[in-house]
Image: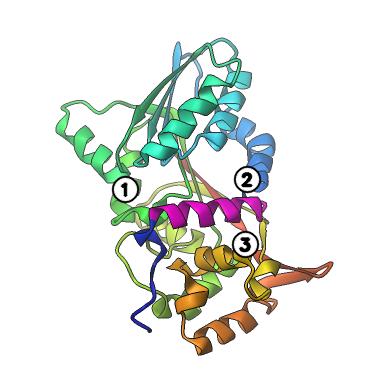
Amino acid sequence: MASSMRSLFSDHGKYVESFRRFLNHSTEHQCMQEFMDKKLPGIIARIGDTKSEIKILSIGGGAGEIDLQILSKVQAQYPGVCINNEVVEPSAEQIAKYKELVAKTSNLENVKFAWHKETSSEYQSKMLEKKELQKWDFIHMIQMLYYVKDIPATLKFFHSLLGTNAKMLIIVVSGSSGWDKLWKKYGSRFPQDDLCQYVTSDDLTQMLDNLGLKYECYDLLSTMDISDCFIDGNENGDLLWDFLTETCNFNATAPPDLRAELGKDLQEPEFSAKKEGKVLFNNTLSFIVVEA
């Protein structure tokens, strides 16, 4: 691996921008919205039974777009019931965006918000110092387990916080997605760092099985339009390359043979589908619902 290649996570601004391009060119949030509309109401149907307050814990809540969709479904299920929504999120920038979103969203009168600017492991350590652990009715971890060092320990800890009838929702990329093939074939040739690990639903279900936890897993197809990656000098394409490979300035710093091989593979059916002249990378998501 060329020494000039460095991890995308070493440049926060670049990471945020490439992630924004990914969201703009993928059906990621639409796919999550579909799950929230079709599946979530059934999943949360009993979480608030006989409770005067519903406690929700968001781990890695980001800028809050998906969190607010979840809250609206809980409100619809339990009209007028107080909701305590606590968010664990290490990025001050994301928390600021989340607060802005809450400020301009109506119908949140019965929701109390609290934000903790810390990682899930920092939150975990802080909670373990307390004598009594608070129980939650719904815990969700959306696209964040890649950034956790000890995933089984994290799953075990947050599962231990589930109250009666409670559920934990985990969203990660599916083992049937293009990400799985990409990481298995090329992961060792991308810059390595300890901030992020390659993990799919296949890995997570194995961990949950090992922990003896009961869960259901749903896959929903999502795609990312990577057509711009095949246009030389396209700024958008360059940023999508960075996101795909988790490499800062991949096009400028990657060895030509790696770039050529990857460029060819990404157009193959195991990674992407070709439709109406577009190359659509398989971004299929898994929604794993863990029982208390």
Is residue 22 one of those drawn in magenta? yes
Crowdedness near tag 3: few (<14), some (14–19) or many (≥20) residues, C-alpha within 10 Å: some
Image point 64% across, 71% down: which residue?
229
**Which residue position is annotated with label 1?**
154
Mark sitting on residue 236: 3
Image point 58% across, 16% down: which residue?
78
Which comes before the other along the chain, label 1 or label 3? 1
The alpha-carbon separation of the residues under discs 1 and 3 comes to 35 Å
Q: Position of residue 140 (x, y in %)?
A: 46, 38
Residue, far bottom? 257
In the image, is 72 to the left or to the right of 128? right
Q: Nearer the viewer, residue 80 or 105?
A: 105
Does residue 292 show up? no
Residue 281 sits above or below residue 34 on the image: below
Assign a secondary structure to mark 1: helix
Mark sitting on residue 29: 2
Crowdedness near tag 2: few (<14), some (14–19) or many (≥20) residues, C-alpha within 10 Å: some
The magenta span reads 12-27
Is residue 149 one of those drawn in magenta? no
Residue, far front? 233
Which comes before the other along the chain, label 2 or label 1? 2
Image point 52% across, 87% down: which residue?
256
The answer to whether marks 2 and 1 mark residues whose Cβ atoms lie closer than 8 Å is no
Which comes before the other along the chain, label 3 or label 2? 2
Which mark is in front, 1 or 3? 3
Residue 158 sits above or below residue 171 on the image: above
The answer to whether marks 3 and 2 mark residues whose Cβ atoms lie closer than 8 Å is no
What type is the residue that disc 1 sits on? Thr
Assign a secondary structure to mark 2: helix
Q: Position of residue 128 (x, y in %)?
A: 19, 36
In the image, is 116 to the left or to the right of 33? left
